[in-house]
Image (cartoon, rainbow, N blue to C red):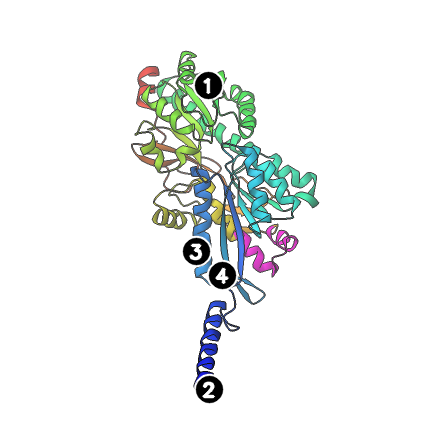
Amino acid sequence: MKRWFSLVAVVVLCLSLVVGVACGGDDDEEEAEIEIGVIGPMAYVQGEHHWYGAQLAAEEINAEGGVLVEGDSYQIKLVQVDSNEILSPTDAASAMEKAITRDNVDFLVGGFRTEAVFAMQDVAMDYGKIFIGCGASEPELCERVADDYDRYKYWFRVTPINSTYLGQVDLMLVAMVAEKMKAELGIELPKVALLAEKAVWADPIVDAANLYLPALGMEIVGEWRPSATANEVTAELTAIEDAGAHIIFTSISGPVGIPYATQWGELEITAASVGINVEAQKDGFWDATGGKGNYEMTMNTYARVNITDETIPFVDRFVERFGELPTYCADTYSAIYLLTAAIERAGALDSDAVVAELEKTDTMGTAGRLVFTEDHDVTWGPGYVTGLGVQWQDGEMNCVWPPAGGAWEGVDYGGAVDYILPPWVVEKWGP
């Protein structure tokens, strides 16, 4: 009997140890976490770079001890949320709802397609969740904050600059190309074709082009609006060439950017391509176009130039970690840093307290000095975030705007090179 009781005691002790290990024990409390949803079209580069940028920031912050909230350390836990917004904007609202109600995220960053972000924004506001936009440029997203602050105060935009400012930079890029044509080819009245994907964000840019390009000494020969997911644009390109265009002014953010640039180069369309082509912002563009995208020029957020002291180190770390240059959607990196800094200053995870601290943001980010406007938009202009103009030149993505030497508002990031007209354009239109 004594032996039996001893055996029972051993079994009970072992069970206690097993249960204690499995449960972690009283002295092994579960690590505190801040859950941040990263929402975007994960099957495409835009969503992929949303995730990469956030991942890099979270890894760095966690390695440094996490987020300190009133003496307690929190680790960042990222939750990947596939919005599928490029193919189906209506899926995005459902994805946002699931992230909040089922995944129980505390905050959100990301969003890309404007039509989808409007819906995602409303869902986030319904739940009082801070949502930092890192992809959609429509000004109305921030105008909502000014119109109904109590409801929309939880929305902020870190990247890109809004489409009004995108349009201004775009116009400067086109003007630079037009001046190059005047100086080298003797074309006094460059003819411009507008090629913009069918998307809300592009509408203000098309409107601005129609209004301002003639005033800048250019003639518009027509508008072409392919689908953002089109894989064939030869009909549009042929029509543009038949119209006698010297320049194609692009507004492309979707996957159509690859077939557009490939077919432009294959056909050697005799019009220089300049504007926005998000696909041309990444390293994979060269291989994806088989080198046919040579001389494509696009507005960009990043290149290996010293916008701030944070830019080149970020670009280098991103390339080392993921094997490619970051697109503008990768500035979820800055969004995570701004958010966690605001949480630490607030000393709480409460959305209202964090909003109040986000509104005080004034810091050097990876793409410029980050200061929010009254309607929670990123501030654009010299000394803040300006954007870049880059051109593919024989396999390298080079910064060509702002021009070297500070010709634009004294801004000189160092490392800029001269823009090059495509040789087949020079051959066609040269003296």
Q: What SS does tag 3 mark?
A: helix
On residue 8, the disc is: none
In front of the other: label 2 or label 3?
Answer: 2
Whole-angstrom CA distance, mark 4 to mark 2, is 56 Å
Q: Which residue is mark 1?
A: 193
| C-beta proximity under 8 Å, tags 4 and 2 | no
Q: Amino acid at mark 4?
A: Gly
Q: 336 or 304, which is in the foreground? A: 336
Whole-angstrom CA distance, mark 3 to mark 1, is 45 Å
Locate residue 91, reporting x and y percent.
55, 36
Q: Amino acid at mark 1?
A: Ala
On residue 59, the disc is: 3
Locate residue 310, reporting x and y percent.
43, 50
Q: Main secondary structure of the magenta part?
A: helix
Which region is colored magenta? Answer: 338-358
Q: Which residue is mark 2?
A: 1
Q: Amino acid at mark 3?
A: Glu
Locate residue 20, reporting x and y percent.
49, 72
Q: Which residue is mark 4?
A: 66
